[in-house]
Image (tube, rainbow, N blue to C red):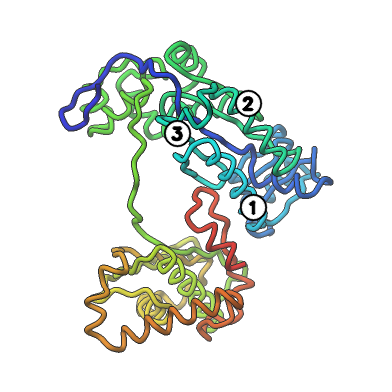
Amino acid sequence: MYDIRFGYVNDDLNKEEPNVMHIDLNSCFATIEQQANPHLRGRPVGVTNRISPACCMVALSYEAKFRGAKVGMRFDEVKAMIPDLIVVETDPPKYHYAYEKLMAIMKSYSPKVQMKSIDEGIVDFHGTRNNINNRSLEDIGYEMKDRLRQDLGCWMKCNIGIAPNRFLAKLAAGFNKPDGLTVIDHNNLEDKYRSLKLTDLPGIANRFEARLNRRGIDSPIDFLNAPPRVLKKYVFQSIIGIHWHQRMRGYEVDDVQTNLGNVGRQHVFNVRTKDERELVKRFSYLCYTTAKKLRYNEVMAKGIYVYLGFKDGDSWYKRHLFKEPFGDDRKLFENAMLIFNQRPKDKIISMASITCYHLHKAEQTNMQLELFHDRLKDEVITETIDDINEVFGNQTIMMATALGAHGVVKQKVPFGSTKYLELLCRQN
């Protein structure tokens, strides 16, 4: 057995029966748009947070991908490549509905479900196989596909990977797209690795590939056969090397919970201006929505980091750690403006972001807050405003400085995370 505390590693492949399933909705946002609008089916579709020549594609239909388009490309680049491209703006309530349906299907088979993003989820069947009468996970996978089409529509497809650990299950879900189902275990693991490049492995991008190459590891098979000492001491130069040695063999090292590190918002200006009223309006709205995220996560912050990008290509940033924690709209805005007002005033802003850090659980600050009557009163007012907005709509009561910004500072759909999907749908 592998035990990180004592440094034991297992050089054998994990021969355990695959009990982890990774589900990946194919071209999630674009496919949902095609499902919702039959006129889009079979046609190249791009999805973006805001339609403009410089916007980026956050999702593409397979019809667009087959013609060379890639997620992250600019709208004008894709349009030049695919003149008949149809572009639509993101519609969070649609994606939230699909997310809820997918999660309900997954939870009906096992209580051990974790959504990794809006379009990807993991079902862990360890200790829960009796819930499915010990049926094979392949049968369950095909049944899930059928239920997805029944619940969401005939155009919905997903890839499913089944393996002994999360890493290999995600790798398996990448084969035979779209609508594939692949099982990886100790019997076919090496054959699957031989068909791939290093950068095909989840978590291995160009930087890690270069590290591996420097030690003569040029393929997944080389990676599999690399001694744990080499990976730990020379390639990754940390315990991460041992994790990779075990991960590649099918042992679980990724079933961990991570702590929330920071909370923030970013906005790319569609109108470039130095007008102070317009800048403050938009920046104020970033503060307003960031404060809502803090309260949604039941945390308060002490630090604020402001980053600005300018039209001429330059950038500016500044951070400050405050003595007292904050989580209400007014105090966050006041603190952030102390930083924002130190920016170069002669520059035209093209992008602004605010990040709150040094986070603490809200209940950890309550005893301190009770010493300050005004702070406690602010908390009561903030809770009351949140309750009113929950019932009557997100912008019923808000800071006057942010009025009018809701229509121009649009919330991006959190493609890589499910953390704020519920909050985003309540706001829209």
Q: Which residue is mark 2?
A: 180
Frontmost of labels 3 and 2 is 3
Tag on residue 97?
A: 1
**How far is mark 2 from mark 1, CA to CA?**
23 Å
Label 2 secondary element: loop
Q: Which residue is mark 3?
A: 124
Label 1 secondary element: helix
Q: Amino acid at mark 1?
A: Tyr
**How far is mark 3 from mark 2, CA to CA?**
19 Å
Q: Residue furthest left?
A: 6
Disc 3, disc 1: CB below 8 Å? no
First reached walking from the N terminus: tag 3 or tag 2: 3
Query: 401 or 256, which lies in front?
Result: 256
Q: Position of residue 8 (x, y in %)?
A: 19, 23
Would you call the spot at circle 1 few (<14 residues within 10 Å), some (14-19), or many (20 or more)?
A: few
- Drawn side of residue 126 relative to residue 422, left or right: left
Quarter residue 321 falls in? bottom left
Q: Amino acid at mark 2?
A: Gly
Number of callouts: 3
First reached walking from the N terminus: tag 2 or tag 1: 1
Query: 8 or 74, which lies in front?
Result: 8
Is residue 296 visible in this depiction of the protein? yes
